[in-house]
Image (spheres, rainbow, N blue to C red):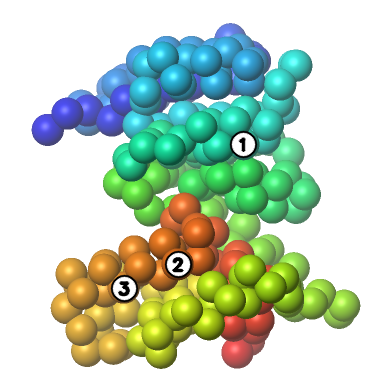
Amino acid sequence: MNPIRVLLADDHHLVRTGFRVILEIEDDIEVVGEAADGERAVGMTRALRPDVVLMDVEMPGVDGLEATRRISAGDDEPGGPAVLMLTTFDRDDYLFAALRAGASGFLLKNGTPEALVDAIRVVARGDGLLAPELTRRVIATFARPGSQPGDDVASEAALDSLTPREREVLVLVAGGASNAEIAASLHLGEATVKSHVSRVLAKLGLRDRVQAVVFAYEHGVVRPGG
């Protein structure tokens, strides 16, 4: 089995060195390059085709959010790189901007090395990931007074294209259920659930489960506490 190819993007050399030390002791992970700013991260992603880009948010010149947008916009091939955002800044605007830019995951730098390694493996296999404290904040954001679900015509049409079963799957995904948990809840096989999830993402134009969670709350498919 080929190792997970990771590109490190952070403007601090010591931080990149620390990440490299953490990751290169893992047999299934290979660090293929380092970038000190977003511009180089985009260029190296196109040249090296890593499986995962570990992206800092705040960098000089092109920041991590813009770099993520460019990587996602240029990813017109199946199996393109997943972007895992890492930051010391615990801010909601960064979180939502990263998800909308196409990031597959968002972690704070105060996490453990084990959490970082696990996160890379999760996004490498095509799943989305949020740190638990960030998932709670996504839900809390849509529970605030005055928070309204999205109502753009294209999104509503996409929602209408879901079958009743696909909508059930979306609700369970938004609740944080795994494929195995969805399968048990709906009395389906895991392979069938995986197919349903893939169709939901395709119909809604979403990259992964993390974006599905945000979409479901934004458009009132599920509501906090519901």
Q: Residue at x 50, y 59 (%)?
A: 205
Q: Which mark is residue 149?
A: none
In front of the other: 87 or 1: 1
The quadrant of the picture occupied by the C terminus is bottom right
Cα distance, mark 1 to mark 3? 27 Å
Using residue 2 as the reference point, say whether residue 31 is left or right of it: right
Estimate the x, y position of residue 176 in percent, counting from the top left.
Answer: 46, 71
Cα distance, mark 3 to mark 2? 11 Å
In front of the other: 99 or 152: 152
CB under 8 Å between callouts 1 and 3?
no
Mark 3, residue position: 196
Above or below, comparing residue 48 to residue 167 in the picture: above
Q: Residue at x 58, y 76 (%)?
A: 157
Using residue 106 as the reference point, say whether residue 178 is left or right of it: left
Q: Residue at x 32, y 25 (%)?
A: 5
CB under 8 Å between callouts 1 and 2?
no
